[in-house]
Image: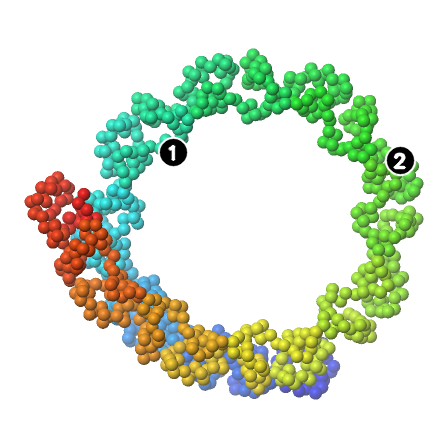
């Protein structure tokens, strides 16, 4: 490429005819240029000798180094340095530190607002500063372990919290700053109650007063009647919060001790009341016996009272076996006599709780299931004589040994038959026993299966030890065979290789299945084994083609197999079906033939002078002159690779097509409509073009006024809003930001409706930041006077600003307190500056004397609104 391509002679580079082994690095030829370069001094600076990092073959002088390829890309003010020496002083390039402090430590030490050194700030300047703008650094507190929320986020200055310039080690717990508030709280008294100082358990940074404790986050969630307690002191008497027991009996032991139906104490019931009772309904407790180890079934489930089984109030320790209650029934049973027969007392083996009489014993559940004639025995005593049930043997011979000894056809004893009668007999049919020879290691097939009598093979009643090989009975036939002579040929005596029990004469040898050399083509047409196995030699016959056809290989001249170095594996091109007219499948090589290559009629069209091995496989090896002669575009000047296959194909050389989608810049939209490469690749420049939009469209970015992209600080990643299909009318998806547009926000037609004066960065995202005027102007109720929080979203939504709804825990919208009874908040909250205050007596102006009489003996009763709510949290009078 470049100046290399202008060398007229090979010898200009390949000196003394050296072509192989020449180095391909720049320094191998240009080391003198490298050593002589002084601006900057390459040797002194320790530059690598990989010249191509900065230079190109097209233009050696005016080298360009892309600093963004290093571990320190240049951004912001760094990118404006016109000379390398601005940073690389005294020609030092290697080993320069990359941290901000290495160059800007003086700036760090001189900073006093705040004092970086005194405050112990780290020297990682990039935490707050950027290379684009050093002054006006911004620290994002939300990146620390203590993000600012609620009232914390309203602090305008760092010193509001970081007093005396102390930044490191500032505590992060609520108590660290608010311990005085904690100690001064008396309702309830946090110190006396032993509350933890983890204020966030009940309080939030958005609203400190009116703390809410969620009891369901503790190990004792409130359910049923517990959840109706209006005040903490209902359970936490005398301000005791820590260490209160959580078991039922800790509060309800008196109820437990006073219960007499049944008597819980006398019965030894556990004090785990929740086993039968619930917090929703205490009386009418239900005990589910099926949750015990003795679920009630059948007649047991019909007992109406616990005392039917738990006599004298005994609940614990009652046995669970049948015989513990029904042993008398067991002992009195005589048909059969359970005691005399030694039956186990596990009554459930034959009886059920649904039906006790008429017990059924399933003999098939034992190790001796009844089948055939055994199953026809009507009575147990037919086999279990004298009431003997346990220990009876289970083998056939134990009852039928006399039948075994008396059998003479064949004589079982003399023949040494085993006494496992079930081998031939069944319980369904004893006489006419059948022996299945196929269950032995010698199944009967062919002529063997036609033997009518066992003695045809088992002579003299010998059954055990009969040999199973063919030669054991047919050795004389093997030795007498002469066509071919089995003994002389060294055939094995495994007769079954060629013979079968179905047909002994006319044996057939399956050359395909029995050997590793199946016969195909012309081999299959040999009528006699001797055609290949000359002299009755069968073992050691060669299996490769050249073992028999080497003379044919050596005599072939078109092409000359020996000179061409062809392998002697004839089957590569020839087959046994057709030897002449061999076909070589080039597609089995590393260079399959396609397109115009496949149309070559002769091998010599490409393999000149009979050279087949070492033929190059790259396009340029044969088509380099076509590459160098191409001018539209000029492949050499453009630096195109010599891999022609990237654009050309063997099917069609001219009209090459480059698939731009295979690059890191696929063409879409308007880009895909460019008719010529030169529309984008000006002056034949193809390599090194960047893929960012700004590379070509920076001018359009700079000229855009609606909105002004440059002054707004928009990123130059145009594709964020634009697309190649439609450049004008760009659309920005605000929902991809941390402030998605909903409700009325989504109806704003212009960006400037919210982003005033073209300011896009730093726009606040809280409601109050934009709607402070509305907040201050609201009079019903007066938000400022009432001290409402500025978290507007607590009551308002972007869908509907007016008609805000406050989620009131007291039922003011239903029942006797529905809105028809009151019209304005001040009906119950007379102090518009403090909505934590309320009164019940505006509507319930009963005399104190009457209320005192009505609440006589009511624990905790006091005639005031707070106590009214404590006992009537749902507004009901019951």
* Element type at mark 2: helix
Question: Who is closer to the viewer here, 79 or 339?
Answer: 339
Q: Residue 477 carries which label?
A: 2
Q: In which quarter of the image is residue 376?
A: top right
Residue designated by label 1: 291
Q: Which of marks 1 and 2 is nearer the N terminus?
A: 1
Q: In this view, does 105 lie above or below 699?
A: above
Indicate left or right for 159 with 518 as reference: left
- The x and y percentages for residue 781 are 18, 64
Which marked residue is nearer to the observer: mark 1 or mark 2? 1
Provide residue 773's location: percent of width, then percent of height.
Answer: 22, 71
Residue at disc 1, secondary structure? helix
Is residue 285 depicted above or below 738 in this figure? above
| Residue 731 appears anywhere in the view | yes
Residue 183 seen = no
Which residue shows up at 64% across the image and 82% down it?
635
Q: Which of 636 and 870 is in front in this view?
A: 870
């Amino acid at each position: 490429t470049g100046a290399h391509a202008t060398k007229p002679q090979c010898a200009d580079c390949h000196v003394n005819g050296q072509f192989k082994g020449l180095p391909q690095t720049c320094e191998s030829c240009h080391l003198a240029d490298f050593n002589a370069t002084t601006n900057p001094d390459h040797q002194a600076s320790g530059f690598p000798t990989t010249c191509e990092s900065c230079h190109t073959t097209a233009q050696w002088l005016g080298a360009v180094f892309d600093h963004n390829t290093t571990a320190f890309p240049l951004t912001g003010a760094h990118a404006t340095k016109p000379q390398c020496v601005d940073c690389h002083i005294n020609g030092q390039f290697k080993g320069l530190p990359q941290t901000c402090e290495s160059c800007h430590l003086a700036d760090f030490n001189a900073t006093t607002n705040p004092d970086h050194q005194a405050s112990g700030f780290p020297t990682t300047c990039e935490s707050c500063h950027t290379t684009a703008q050093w002054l006006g650094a911004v620290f994002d507190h939300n990146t620390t372990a203590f993000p600012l929320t609620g009232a914390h986020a309203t602090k305008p200055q760092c010193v509001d919290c970081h007093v005396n310039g102390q930044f490191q080690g500032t505590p992060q717990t609520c108590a660290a700053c608010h311990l005085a508030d904690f100690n001064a709280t008396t309702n309830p008294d946090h110190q006396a109650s032993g509350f933890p100082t983890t204020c966030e358990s009940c309080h939030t940074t958005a609203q400190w007063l009116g703390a809410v404790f969620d009891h369901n986050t503790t190990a004792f969630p409130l359910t049923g009647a517990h959840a109706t307690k209006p005040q903490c002191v209902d359970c936490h008497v005398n301000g005791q919060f820590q260490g209160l027991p959580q078991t039922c009996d800790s509060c309800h032991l008196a109820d437990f001790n006073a219960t007499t139906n049944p008597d819980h104490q006398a019965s030894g019931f556990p004090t785990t009341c929740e086993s039968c009772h619930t917090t929703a309904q205490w009386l009418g407790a239900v005990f589910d016996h099926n949750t015990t180890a003795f679920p009630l079934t059948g007649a047991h489930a019909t007992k109406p009272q616990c005392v039917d089984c738990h006599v004298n109030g005994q609940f614990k320790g009652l046995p669970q076996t049948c015989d513990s209650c029904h042993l008398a029934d067991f002992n009195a049973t005589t048909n059969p006599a359970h005691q005399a027969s030694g039956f186990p007392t596990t009554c459930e083996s034959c009886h059920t709780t649904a039906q006790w009489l008429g017990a059924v014993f399933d003999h098939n559940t034992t190790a001796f299931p009844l089948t055939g004639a055994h199953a026809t025995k009507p009575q147990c005593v037919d086999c279990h004589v004298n009431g003997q049930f346990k220990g009876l043997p289970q083998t056939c011979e134990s009852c039928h040994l006399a039948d075994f000894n008396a059998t003479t056809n064949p004589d079982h004893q003399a023949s040494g038959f085993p006494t496992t009668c079930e081998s031939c007999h069944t319980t369904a049919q004893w006489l006419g026993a059948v022996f299945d020879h196929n269950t032995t290691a010698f199944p009967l097939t062919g002529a063997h299966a036609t033997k009518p009598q066992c003695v045809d093979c088992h002579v003299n009643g010998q059954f055990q030890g009969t040999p199973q090989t063919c030669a054991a009975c047919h050795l004389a036939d093997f030795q007498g065979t002469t066509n071919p002579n089995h003994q002389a040929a060294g055939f094995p005596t495994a007769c079954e290789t060629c013979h079968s029990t179905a047909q002994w004469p006319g044996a057939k040898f399956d050359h395909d299945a029995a050997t590793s050399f199946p016969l195909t083509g012309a081999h299959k047409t040999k009528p006699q084994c001797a055609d290949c196995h000359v002299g009755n030699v069968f073992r050691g016959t060669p299996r490769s083609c050249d073992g028999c056809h080497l003379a044919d290989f050596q005599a072939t001249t078109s092409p000359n197999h020996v000179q061409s170095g062809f392998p002697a594996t004839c089957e590569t091109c020839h087959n046994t079906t057709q030897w002449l007219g061999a076909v070589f499948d080039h597609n089995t090589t590393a260079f399959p033939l396609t397109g115009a290559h496949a149309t070559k009629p002769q091998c010599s069209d490409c393999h000149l002078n009979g050279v087949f091995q070492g033929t190059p496989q790259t396009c340029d090896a044969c088509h380099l002159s076509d590459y160098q002669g191409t001018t539209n575009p000029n492949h050499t000047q453009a630096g195109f690779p010599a891999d022609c296959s990237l654009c050309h194909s063997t099917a069609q050389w001219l009209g090459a097509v480059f698939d731009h989608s295979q690059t890191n810049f696929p063409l879409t939209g308007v880009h895909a409509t460019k008719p010529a490469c030169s529309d984008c690749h000006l002056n034949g420049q193809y390599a090194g073009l960047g893929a960012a939009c700004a590379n070509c469209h920076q001018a359009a970015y700079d000229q855009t006024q609606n909105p002004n992209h440059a002054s707004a600080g928009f990123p130059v990643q145009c594709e964020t809003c634009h697309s190649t299909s439609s450049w004008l009318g760009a659309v920005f998806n605000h929902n991809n930001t941390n402030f998605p547009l909903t409700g009325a926000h989504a109806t704003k037609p212009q960006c400037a409706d919210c982003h005033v004066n073209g300011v896009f960065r730093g726009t606040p995202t809280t409601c109050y930041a934009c709607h402070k005027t509305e907040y201050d102007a609201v009079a019903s109720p007066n938000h400022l006077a009432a001290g409402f929080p500025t978290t507007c979203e607590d009551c308002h939504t972007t869908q509907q600003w007016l008609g805000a709804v406050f989620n009131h825990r007291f039922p003011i919208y239903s029942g006797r307190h529905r809105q028809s009874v009151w019209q304005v908040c001040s009906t119950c909250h007379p102090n518009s500056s403090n909505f934590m205050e309320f009164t019940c007596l505006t509507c319930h102006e009963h005399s104190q004397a009457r209320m005192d009489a009505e609440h006589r003996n009511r624990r905790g009763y006091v005639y005031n609104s707070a106590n009214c709510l404590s006992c009537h949290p749902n507004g009901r009078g019951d």
